[in-house]
Image (cartoon, rainbow, N blue to C red):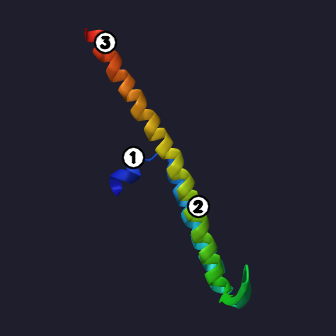
Amino acid sequence: MKEWWEGLSNSQKLKYIISAVLGILVLIFAIVNWKSIPVNFLIVSVRIPTTLLIVLSLAGGFGLATLFDYRKFRKKDKEITALKTQLKMRDAEDEI
């Protein structure tokens, strides 16, 4: 873990620290607002605590962000693999 943290750039470290602080602030806000409120899901209405609603919304947002980041990095990984293959082919042609 220490090696991973030291391998990050300062901007990446700052991003993780800010995200952690914001996450803690959101949880504190959620705990302070423990009242139950009605929430409408299309045809069903349920009463859930505000805290649970906030945490579920936070988890959903995190999940969506992770999904979009995964797609972006997967696309870049495919591009890197294709470029490495092209380099190997050029190196093989140069040796001939």
Q: Secondary structure at mark 1?
A: helix
4 or 47: which is nearer to us? 47
Dot 3 amino acid type: Glu
Dot 1 amino acid type: Gly
Q: Which residue is mark 2?
A: 64
Q: Secondary structure at mark 2?
A: helix
Q: Which residue is mark 1?
A: 7
Q: Earlier in the sequence, mark 1 or mark 3?
A: 1
Q: Which residue is mark 3?
A: 93
Q: Earlier in the sequence, mark 2 or mark 1?
A: 1
**Residue 7 left/right relative to 48:** left
14 or 33: which is nearer to us? 33
The residue shown at (35%, 16%) is 90
Closer mark to the observer between disc 1 and disc 3: 3
Using the numbered discs, state the Cα–Cα distance from disc 2 to disc 1 in whole angstroms.
26 Å
Residue sitting at the far front: 43
For label 1, count other residues whose C-alpha is less than 10 Å away and answer few (under 14), some (14-19) or many (20+): few
